[in-house]
Amino acid sequence: MRVLIFGASGLLGRAVMRAFADGHVTGTGFRRQRSGLIRVDATSRDAVWHALDQARPDVVVNCVGERHGRVRAEEPARAHELNVSVARLIAEATCAYGVRLLHISSDYVFDGIAPPYRPDSWCRPQGFYGRLKLLAEDMVRAVHPEAVILRLPMLYGPVEYAAESDITEIAQEVSCGRPVELDDACIRYPTHVDDAAQVCRRLATAQVQGRLVGTVHHWSAQHGFTNYQIGLRIARHFCLPAGHIKAGVRDLAGGDQPVDPRLDCTDLRAVLGWPPENDRTFANNFPHVVAPWVRSICP
Ligand SMILES: NC(=O)c1ccc[n+]([C@@H]2O[C@H](COP(=O)([O-])OP(=O)(O)OC[C@H]3O[C@@H](n4cnc5c(N)ncnc54)[C@H](OP(=O)(O)O)[C@@H]3O)[C@@H](O)[C@H]2O)c1
């Protein structure tokens, strides 16, 4: 199976590259150049088509996106371009080449008022990012009806800089000791990128084998935490003081995020038969991920 991953230099894309490492995989980056990646500006139609022409994949995984709040606030046009326009370009190109497409979306397409959300639950995003992700989904479905869409929640895993994931950003804020207010209203379901990447691999394989066509799927860890609870856990684990961490009553981005967008993954668990019920827990896995970003005062 030949796989082309757009956005392979990002948090999720790197994990998806690892998940396909034993196969025939091509990854693209843009600003971050790495050996083994080709540089593709996915906002350019020609560049996307050229990448497909070169790689001749059986399946494409689109991990390009812009989820950082600062960019969304300061450069909304860029956020639209990377989340929506790129999704359309990749969908058009894959459809024209007759290539399977796995498109990555987000739990932010839901309002977070009545969880859990099934793949066919009504989408009603609360903020700009969620609206972009939903627009992208609609675009992908319209252009490439056979594409598969995978909605994911908050991801964590090995990062290249602290702000690359919310968890490591929280860890850095907690460990620097300055007063910090962390949201204690919105529940998130931190999911390890390697689990999400394994799901991508299994979905992509099922697509190429013709077992999945034009469906929407959910994947998520099942334990929920607020950012405040995550901050306290990090402080406790690394023996850091916690007096400077204050519970925020509503998310700091201005209340435009879903309060509890828990994803119902029953269908996908049944389709994939993986992983077993006791998949990896946040409690056991966050310490490895945040350790490099925490100044520990443990003995
Ligand atoms: N992270 C999460 O918590 C989370 C949760 C749910 C869903 N998602 C979704 O998962 C997907 C991947 O997210 P992520 O966290 O891995 O994002 P990320 O770490 O910010 O990676 C974004 C990727 O997009 C690439 N990119 C940016 N501009 C590009 C351009 N003009 N042309 C081609 N590629 C470009 C980046 O390449 P360079 O860095 O090399 O420029 C990078 O590989 C997104 O759709 C996101 O909405 C993420």
Image: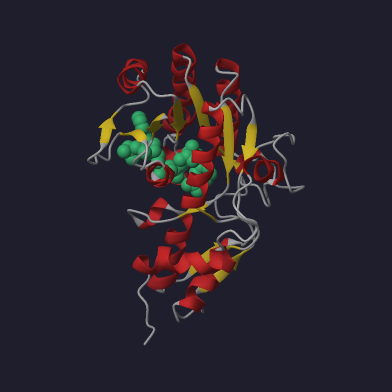
Q: For residue 104, say whether it is visible.
A: no
Question: In the displayed image of the protein, which residue is found farthest to the bottom?
Answer: 299
Q: Nearer the viewer, residue 250 or 100?
A: 100
Q: In the picture provided, is 291 more to the left or to the right than 268?
A: left
Question: In the displayed image of the protein, which residue is found farthest to the right?
Answer: 114
Q: Up-down: is 172 above or below 151?
A: below
Task: Pinpoint residue 230: horizontal percent, then vertical percent.
Answer: 55, 66
Quadrant in the picture for the C terminus: bottom left
Q: Residue at x 37, y 54 (%)?
A: 159
Task: Pinpoint residue 51: horizontal percent, then vertical percent.
Answer: 32, 22
Task: Pinpoint residue 167: horizontal percent, then vertical percent.
Answer: 47, 59
Q: How many marks?
A: 0
Q: Up-down: is 179 above or below 6?
A: below
Q: Nearer the viewer, residue 197 or 210?
A: 210
Quadrant in the picture for the N terminus: top left
Task: Pinpoint residue 273: horizontal percent, then vertical percent.
Answer: 64, 46
Answer with the quarter of the image where residue 176 lies.
bottom left
Question: In the displayed image of the protein, which residue is found farthest to the top?
Answer: 96
Q: Nearer the viewer, residue 29 or 294?
A: 29
